[in-house]
Amino acid sequence: MLAKRIIPCLDIKDGHTVKGTNFVNLRQAGDPIELGKAYSEQGADELVYLDITASHEGRKTFTELVGKIAREINIPFTVGGGINELKDVERLLNAGADKVSINSAAIRRPELIDEIASHFGSQVCVVAIDAKQTEKGWYCYLNGGRIETERNLFEWAKEANDRGAGEILFTSMNHDGVKNGFADEALRQLSDSLTIPVIASGGAGKKEHFRDTFVNGHSDAALAASVFHFGEIPIPELKKYLINEGINIRI
Amino acid sequence: MDVAIVKYNAGNIFSVINAVKRLGIEPKLTDNAEELRKADKVIFPGQGEANTTMHYLRERGLDKVISSLTQPVLGICIGMQLMCRHSEEEDTDCLGIFNIDVRRFEPVRHEDKVPQMGWNTIENCKSPLFKGFERPEFVYFIHSFYVPMSDFTIASTNYILPYSSALHKDNFYATQFHPEKSGKVGERILQNFIEL
């Protein structure tokens, strides 16, 4: 049976991980490769590296970093941040990334999804969606949650699915950073209406939240950052817990 | 140890090069028939679509070169599917090394998403390729098409139905999963192949 996936997310600025870490035995806590290796050894099923640099120089540094990650890491990894056109995708895949995650650029020009799927295959195309629930429903946001759009979450996710996305990475802005669990109701609606895997993001605070999103949210994978970086939830312990809860997990 | 990797228009080839390098071997990426024939081991990797890749191989005569190799050959993912007789993907005639046809996954329940993407277990492993494994190990898959169970099956996986996750015939070995992305387990499988 296909296992549910646990995915740590690393934010990268100028070639270094941004959020502090609490790992022991790490020579350099800010080194994205050391950190990625440590996660991989702990049992992470995939890694996501998000480039939060804005400058052109930073993009170049990130591409070089992707090449180094590809040489060192033996599990799949996705890269995202600042991907606007097909040639950004090509640059990152050529550097050795397994998948790319696109966000604002896809909402601005949805054809980008079709282009990535037809050039490189759906399996490399992760569409990340930041959305917030208000009185009028779930709506998508651009630029890391700064700009509201008229796009409904469920309609946009379905469109991305139909255009050839390989996976949806949904971050609930209501839940992100609150550590009170994932947006399982919305995740369940997404997962039950789409034909591609859904990755839950935003809200992980305790081990139970992972179980809940797999069981109640029907999520295929769960992504988190700070609970892993600060060692609040060690991955081996999380995986052991999930197995005891009857969830199919890779060990 | 001279390891050649077949150079063709498939994706993900760099991952395989990196994985072989991590084992301390510098592989040679080539589409030259002589270089492929004289290598100790040949890896036929890839990610992509059956029809365009088969077309590319035929245009360059690589189809005949691969089928006639006599040293251990390892096909990976689309490489494995291309080593079969025919694929439902774009109704493609393949290399015919394994006398069996590749089929498309047909979802039975909504949870059966296609492609299968992620970690699943390999079971009933019977090959030196899986030397050292004592339990069903998890490996990484991404695929929409599958090879049914057959006499060539040396490992099986269950997704929608039980199917062949690895094949063997004579000097030809193949895995549907990506050993180059399957952590330590995948590394061991590549190492086992190199040591055949």
Image: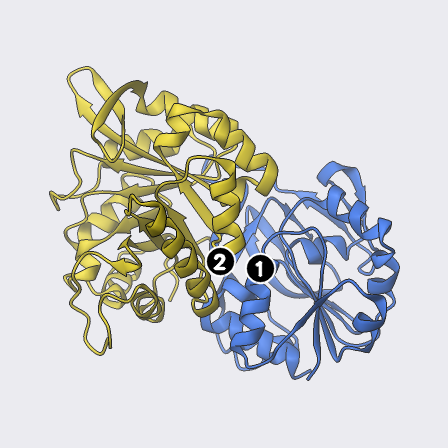
Q: Residue at x 49, y 72 (%)?
A: B185
Element carrying mark 1: loop
Residue type at numbered disc 2: Asn
**Foreground residue among A41 and B165:** A41
The quadrant holding residue A184 is top left
The chain letter for the residue carrying disc 2 is B
Q: Look at the image and tell me whether residue A102 can be seen.
A: yes
Residue with the mark numbered 1: B177
User: Residue B107: x, y in percent?
Assistant: 55, 37
Label 2: few (<14), some (14–19) or many (≥20) C-alpha neighbours in 10 Å = many
Q: Is residue A196 above or below residue B135?
A: above
> Alpha-carbon distance for marks 1 and 2?
9 Å
Q: Considering the image in quadrants, where does the C terminus of chain B appear?
A: bottom right
The chain letter for the residue carrying disc 1 is B
The answer to whether A226 appears left or right of A120 in the picture is left
Element carrying mark 2: strand
Q: Is residue B32 above or below residue A123?
A: below
Contact (Cβ within 8 Å) of mark 1 with mark 2: yes
Q: Is residue A250 above or below residue B78?
A: below
Q: Colour of chain A?
A: yellow
Q: How is the image coloured?
A: by chain
Q: Which label is found at residue B120?
A: 2
The answer to whether A243 appears left or right of B21 in the picture is left
